[in-house]
Image (spheres, helix red, strand yellow):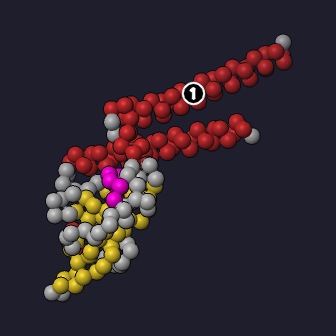
Amino acid sequence: MIKKFLTLSGNLLLLLVIVVLLASLYSLIQSKRNPDDLPSILGFNVLTVQSGSMEPSIKRGDLIIVRPSENRKINDVVTYRNKAGTLVTHRIVNIVSEEETIFYQTKGDANNVVDNDLVSMNQLIGTVILKIPKLGTLLGFFRTFWGMTILILIPFLLISISIVQKMIAKEQVQETTQNFRG
């Protein structure tokens, strides 16, 4: 029972590592080919939060999944490019209409005042649909030399251990068979 659990856990860990490796590699290639575009996977942007302006709801190092959306409302957490071109993830606190154009007033949960500039529809990347605590920090590590090295070594080691276990089990079966006949 425990052996089956450990085998299943090892296989799931290996699968997770492979998925993370492929997703990281894909997003890395995307960002190198098109530095001005945000990397996306199946139309969703995967971003790491860099500041504490949305604490306690979203913390620095959290991974957020952002989906392009049309219908935004007050209290939605959105990601947009500010006028300096920096990505910002803040909450919509007000919707303003000026000359038939819609703008959003945003504020970080940890900030005392609303953001200075209104956000236009053209600046919006999308709405945050999922937050995974600390995963952004972990993925950031995997983008470093040592992180990539570990990502390559873990599957190699898991596969090697599996092969050695199978060889030992086969050898034990052969010994048992010989002793039984013997």
The relative height of residue 170 versus residue 178 in the rendered view (above or below) is below
* SS type, badge 1: helix
Viewer-proximal residue, 172 or 8? 8
Residue 96 in the figure: left or right of residue 92:
left
Instruction: Give percent across and percent down for residue 130.
Output: 44, 62
| Rendered location of residue 47, percent (x, y) | 34, 54
Q: Quadrant of residue 58?
A: bottom left
> Which residue corresponds to mark 1?
161
| Residue numbers of the magenta segment | 46-53
Q: Establish if 94 lies above or below 13.
A: below
Give the percent coordinates (x, y) of residue 24: 36, 45
Q: How many marks?
A: 1
Q: Residue furthest bottom?
A: 100
Residue 48 forms part of the magenta stretch: yes
On the rendered image, what quadrant is the C terminus found in? top right
Q: Residue at x 74, y 23 (%)?
A: 173
Q: Is residue 9 visible?
A: yes
Asked if residue 113 lies in the magenta stretch, the reply is no
Question: Residue 109: which quarter of the image?
Answer: bottom left
Residue at position x 36%, y 43% in the image: 140
Front one among 120 and 18 = 120
Magenta span dominant secondary structure: loop
- The amino acid pointed to by label 1 is Ile
Q: Residue at x 61, y 41 (%)?
A: 9
Task: Tell which residue pokes out farthest to the front in this image.
Answer: 112
Q: Quadrant of the N terminus?
A: top right
143 vs 94, nearest the viewer: 94
Local crowd size for mark 1, using a 10 Å CA cut-off: few (<14), some (14–19), many (≥20)? few
- Where, by quadrant of the figure, is residue 150 drawn? top left
Q: Which residue is at the front of the view, 95 or 45?
A: 95
Counting from the top left corner in percent of width and height, residue 78 is at 33, 67
